[in-house]
Image (spheres, rainbow, N blue to C red):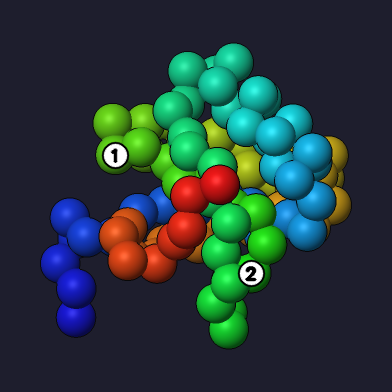
Amino acid sequence: APDAQAMCLYIGGLPDQKEAQSVEQRLTSLDIKVRLQSLNLPDASGYWLRVAPESRRLAEDLPFENLAKEFNELKHKIMLCEGVATVE
């Protein structure tokens, strides 16, 4: 199994880039550093925001249910950091 350092928190799964950018702005306003990425994996496609390691604790403390209500298809997932995503 990959070590914990190689795993990152991703928030997204959104089909629309504009919606993903809205989530990105919301997280950035909460001092959570993220990077927008487009994924095309069997279990994770669409636009995802990779949470920077230094922001992960903040992101994990986020009331995720509130964000998920506002952005309909929003998910969060722990996935490999590198070699998974293509940067937009």
Crowd rating for badge 2 (residues with CA inside 10 Å; few <14, some 14–19, many 20+) = some
Residue 26 appearing in the image: yes
Q: Which residue is rendered at x = 75% and y = 45% of the image?
A: 17
Q: How many marks?
A: 2
Looking at the picture, which amino acid does disc 2 mark? Ser
Residue 61 appearing in the image: no
Image location of residue 27, percent across then percent down: 58, 28
* Left or right of 13 on screen, residue 62: left
The image quadrant of residue 79 is: bottom left
Image location of residue 6, percent across then percent down: 22, 60
* Left or right of 77 on screen, residue 26: right
Instruction: Single out the mark in the foreground, 1 or 2.
Output: 2
**Discs 1, 2 touching: Cβ within 8 Å:** no
Disc 1 marks which residue? 53
Along the polypeptide, which appears first: circle 1 or circle 2? 2
Residue 61 badge:
none
Q: Quadrant of the N terminus?
A: bottom left
Disc 2 marks which residue? 45
